Structures are given as structure tokens and as C-alpha cells.
Amino acid sequence: MTNNDAYQPKPSHKFSFGLWTLGNRGRDPFGDFVRPVISPVEIANMLGEVGAWGVNLHDNDLVPIDATPAERDAIVREFKKACAENKLVVPMATVSLFFHPIFRDGAFTANDAEVRAYALQKTMRAMDLGAELGAKIFVLWGGREGVETDACRRADDAVKRLREAVNYLCEYNLDQKYGFKFALEAKPNEPRADIYMATTGHYLGFIPTLDHPEMVGVNPEVAHEQMAGLNFMHGVAQAWEAGKLFHIDLNDQMPGRYDQDLRFGSANFKSAFWLVKFLEDVNYEGPRHFDAHAYRTEDFCGVKDFARGCMRTYLILKEKAAGWNADKEIRAILQEISAGSNSPPIGRYSKKGAAALLAHVFNKDAICKKRLPYERLDQLTVDLLAGLR
């Protein structure tokens, strides 16, 4: 690629990566690390080199969990300097409530009240850190908020504890005048056998029960929905329609597998296309965050290839989406399937409108004869993605 490449990332694309993504060392349940540690400063330098716009972090991606206040401040100063030198922003921060053994039974939903209190303290300090770095989005992923056996607690008690925690954090946000928007991230399983808030839809049902629902939205992740065989774009669309798409995690995933966090678009190119098309069609203005990591086979240079690939694929699919929208045959089919309706207007309910609808006679035979050429429409999509249109 050259600097004149049509698929070169720009700040206006709002592409971001987490410290934990490029810093992933390739460890898995069956094998140890294969890459050396890449420090936060080195990651910032790498992101500047590949043309990213932002860098995100968990609290302990940057500051070790037992760092002293002086150590913490020195680390933050050095990281802020690296971000400034590489023209990176920190749009989102989050908290690790899953790595330390203290969270083995959950964090906000744990049976031990002391663990729940520590989880709140840790999250407030992570909010302090995120605010210091300029973040305006705070993601909450309850990776340990679940069970291996439902004998451990009543599930409704877990929901109540989660609500209590999010309400508390919203009040802290207001008290400190941080201006955070909270984005809740769902996942069906792993690392727990069952996680309480399994899908984006679960959280969309939970948010209206909060004290400050206007402050809380969702952070859907491709892998977390597709690992359960769900249509990720549909969940994103529902969140968008509800005004709750505060952030998004882009990666890829084969259904029915463990959480793979593959390079964006590397496994399900067509579903990635529909996702990008949706985000671009509705003019989503939030960060396009890549929560993925390089193959375990890669070295330092391979990590850069991975980061460049995520952004390049998104931009390729963005171009394809514009081509799909402009394609004359596709446009003609879309017009054909939505035209010619003799139905009375519906709109908002009124007695007059309801009477007209009840009195209308529908010609079911004529409606059934209307052609719905979805096979052709889908093949045109395939042809376009294959570069044949």
C-alpha cells in the first residue's frame, strides 16, 4: 500500500484499537505466549504508524492493578505524551472486572458483598483514569457476571445487583461531571458457562429499568453475537433504532466456536458487508473500534499487518456499499418490490383511519402474484462483492 491508496485510513474514519488487541501475546488455553510484551507506548507508536485515529484501554492494560499512586501518574504521563506524539485520541475506556481471581464469582453480581464493593471502587477509579485521558464513552463488559450452576444464586438477584451497580456509577458520573456515556457489552458465554446479559437485546430490555436510562446504551460486538449464531447486524439495527448504539466492537467470528476475535471481515465477508453498509447508510458517527487480535502465528510485523487489514477491509466494504446503493439494477429491483401498493395509508391510529382499514378489501391473489426477486438481488450482491459489477 502507498499513501495514495484509496483504502488508507484517515482520522475522519474514527478507527480505534484497544491496548489489549495489539498487545495480545497469542496465549490460549492450550499454549503459552508466542509474542513478547508490547508496551502501551510502543502500541501508541504502532497505531500512529498504521494510521489509526484512537486507542482504547482497560484500566490495567495501562496501569498495573497494584501500582502506587506515583507509579500510576508516571505511567499515565508517559502514555499521554505518546498519544499526543502520534495524534491519537482516547475515545473509550473500560475496566477489567474479569482477570483477577477476586472476580471468580463475578463482580457486580458476586455473592460476596465485599467483592461487589471492590468492583465499584475499581470501576470508579477506571472512570477517573478514562476521564483524565479524555474518554467520553465507558464500556462495561461483565465477563464474569454469570454462572456454571444456577444453584449459586437466583438469576433475578443478579439482575437487581447489576442494576444497583450501574445506577451507582451513573450517579458518580454526574457527581464528578465526567459526561460519560455508558455502553453495556453483551456475550452469551465464555469465560462463564452462561453470562446473565447474553445478547444486545437483553441489555436493551434492561436499560429502561435504570435510574438514568438516557446515560446508558450498548456496545455490541460481532463475535459475541455470531458465536451464538445470531445475525449481528440485526442487533445493531435494533440498538440504533432505539438510540442506544453508543459504541461498537468490530471483529469476526465463526458461529458455534469459542470467542475467536478474528480480523474484521476475515471469516464472514458478506455479513461484514451488510454491517458496514448499515453503519454507513445511517451515518453512524461513533468510533469504529476493532476488538480483535492477530493470529497466534504472527510476530510484531504481523500485528501491524493485522491492524492495517482491519481498517482496509472496512474501507473496501464501505466502497462496496456505496456501489450497491448506486447500482441501477439493484435500485430498480428495490423500487419494484416496494411499489404499487393499493393499501390505505396507516400512519398513527385514528378512528377514521381504522374504519377505512377495516372497510378496505384486499386482493390477496393479486398481492401473491407480485414478484419478489430476492434470489437475483442476492446474486447481484455476490457479484458486486466479487468485483464483477
Image: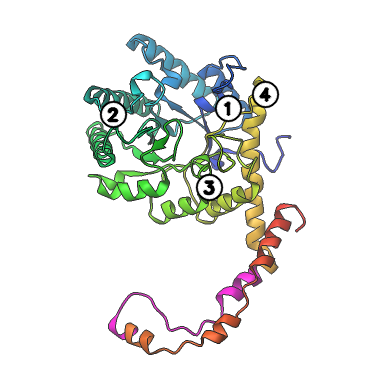
Q: Earlier in the sequence, mark 3 or mark 4?
A: 3
Q: Residues within 10 Å of mark 2 (few under 14, many from 20)?
A: many
Q: Are marks 1 and 3 in contact (CB under 8 Å)?
A: no
Which color mode does the image show? rainbow
Q: Is 159 situated above or below 322?
A: above
Q: Which residue is mark 3?
A: 229
Residue at left 55%, top 82%?
Answer: 367
- Distance between the Cα atoms at labels 4 and 2? 37 Å
Q: Earlier in the sequence, mark 1 or mark 2?
A: 1
Q: Which residue is mark 2?
A: 110
Quarter placement of the C terminus: bottom right
Q: Which residue is mark 4?
A: 297
Q: Position of residue 256 (x, y in %)?
A: 55, 41
Depth check, mark 4 against mark 2: the one in front is: 2
Q: Earlier in the sequence, mark 4 or mark 1?
A: 1
Check disc 4 and give the amino acid type: Thr
Q: Which residues are magenta?
A: 331-353
Check disc 3 and give the amino acid type: Gly
**The stretch drawn in magenta includes residue 61:** no
Q: Which residue is mark 1?
A: 47
Q: Earlier in the sequence, mark 1 or mark 3?
A: 1
**The stretch drawn in magenta includes residue 332:** yes
Residue at left 45%, top 21%?
Answer: 61
* Relative depth, front residue between 5 and 149: 149
Q: Position of residue 6 (x, y in %)?
A: 69, 43
Q: Is 116 situated above or below 325?
A: above
